[in-house]
Amino acid sequence: MIDVIVVGGGPTGLMLACELRLHDVHVVVLEKLDKQTEQSRGQGLHARSVEVMDQRGLLDRFLAVSEKFQVGGLFGGIAKPWPDRLDTAHPFGVATPQPETERLLNQRAIELGVEMRRGCEVVSVSQSADGDADGDEAGVSVELADGTQLNSRYLVGADGGRSTVRKLIGVDFPGEAATVETLLAEMEVTEDAETIAAAVKEVNKTQLRFGITPPVNGLCRIVVPADGVLEDRATEPTIEDFKKQLRAFAGTDFGVHSPRWMSRFGDATRQAERYRVGRVFLAGDSAHIHPPTGGQGLNLGVQDAFNLGWKLAAAVNGWAPEGLLDSYETERHPVAARVIDNTRAQITLLGTEPGPTALRELFAKLMDFEEVNRYVTGMITAVDVRYDFGEGHDLLGGRMRDLELKRGRLYAQMHEGRGLLLDQTGRLSVGGWADRVDHIVDVSEELDVPAVLLRPDGHVAWAGEDQQDLLDRLPKWFGTAAG
């Protein structure tokens, strides 16, 4: 039996598969498409996702093919300088087109031994909570379009906003339908760059959902408001749709031609009522959709996977404490809800009516205040995400930024995806949890607490110096001590 089937081979599914393989979990990724998509909806990684890649030793791969960027408070089309004192050692994002992100994660997944199966469409999902009469263990049965049957202990739907898995397990997806729609494509243009830049600047005075980027490998990224909202969102736009809308806003179609891909997106916001049904989980766009304002969608999905991966591996490997799997929804559902809310606010700021225009002007002035800029940037980049672990030290529940240690950097010690006790006292011990938690005796001038216990995703599970207090906390996240 397969340990975990991941349905969907996009960034979320690939990141999850990599996390699971760090713990020797047998993973099969089922992807409906025969080959990797060329569409690049996600354009990069924000600071928290940059941290995630560094925690797993992947950041250098991204930096080798990407440019760093610093835009503070990129909110509703309002860009400000990067704020001071943002709580991260990685004060930048990386501009990586989604196909490149998928390529790098797929490369890593293959290195780790993930089994990739393309051209596989899931048509049925059923679960057995208590096993069957023959003594087979509980699990999930999946049927593919070609009649193939697969069995696994757990299944994760990471198959996008129109998730088949979500529909098959009967999870509602409430929210708001699209009120505006935008066309997006990569294609060639014949007009010169100077003329295009001048036209975009003029249109952006009143319409911020319009843009044409400089060509990369001969292709420009075109963004233009659509003419209304289609009921069938799956209908792909035509090049004539683009030409018509470009002429409507800029008075010219810039000679666009030879599209590599074309698509449309709206401002619909929806969130799954539940992220878990028995042994089936939802992650990424399967669990939440929202407008792409602020560039948060791909990042949100990758961070879902980073939260779920080690917990699911703990269940497979038999040491997950009670409630650990449920903590995935408890922690990640509020994070997605906040992203949905901030994208709703951004869509309002992007409006062309007098009210939204006045609001955008006011908000731009407010973001000149350092504290406002830092708050908005922390929200967009997700470095301010803090889970509710109850009362305790101020660090509790937040993720630990990378620290300079005597032996190097903190994140360099986290590549294997295990828990970590950073002990500046040299007097502590992880006891019977040494098979799950690394104990590092080292000091950092950047850490003003004697010791911290980090979960595999880098969030602080305990801080202090009392050995018994530490031993009392370890079972909550790492189960029963080994005998």
Image (cartoon, rainbow, N blue to C red):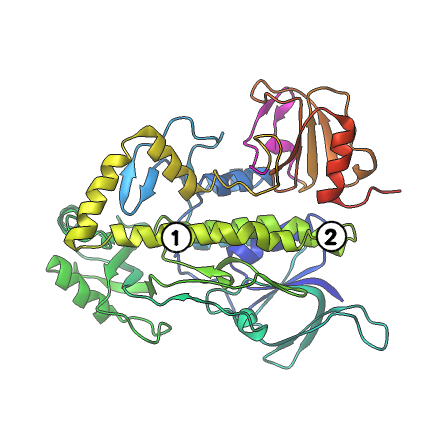
* Residue 100 image offset from top left, x and y in percent: 46, 51
Determine the secondary structure under disc 2: loop
Give the farthest residue toward the right. 483
Q: Main secondary structure of the magenta part?
A: loop
**Going 74% across and 70% down the picture, which residue do you hit?**
129
Using the image, tell me which numbered label, if any, was put on residue 225.
none
Mark 1 and mark 2 lie on one chain; the one further toward the N terminus is 2
User: Does the magenta run of residues contain 406?
Assistant: yes
Quadrant (top left, top right, bottom left, bottom right) of the N terminus: bottom right
* Residue 247 image offset from top left, x and y in percent: 13, 63
Q: Is residue 230 left or right of residue 418?
A: left
**Going 85% across and 42% down the picture, which residue do you hit?**
482
Q: Could you tell me the amino acid type at mark 1? A: Asp
Q: Could you tell me the amino acid type at mark 2? A: Glu
Residue range corresponding to the magenta coloring: 397-415
Quadrant (top left, top right, bottom left, bottom right) of the C terminus: top right
Determine the secondary structure under disc 1: helix
* Residue 269 image offset from top left, x and y in percent: 39, 61
Give the farthest residue toward the left. 251
Using the image, tell me which numbered label, if any, was put on residue 322.
2
Residue placed most toward the observer, 103 or 83? 83
* Residue where numbered disc 1 is placed: 341
Residue 218 in sight: no
Residue 118 in sight: yes
* Residue 133 image offset from top left, x and y in percent: 84, 77
Residue placed most toward the observer, 303 or 196? 303
Give the farthest residue toward the front. 391
Give the class, few, some or many, for how many residues have Cα within 10 Å of label 1's Cα (few <14, many ≥20): few
Q: Is residue 422 left or right of residue 138?
A: left
Q: Disc 1, disc 2: CB below 8 Å?
A: no
Q: Is residue 134 left or right of residue 57?
A: right
User: Does the magenta run of residues contain 147?
Assistant: no
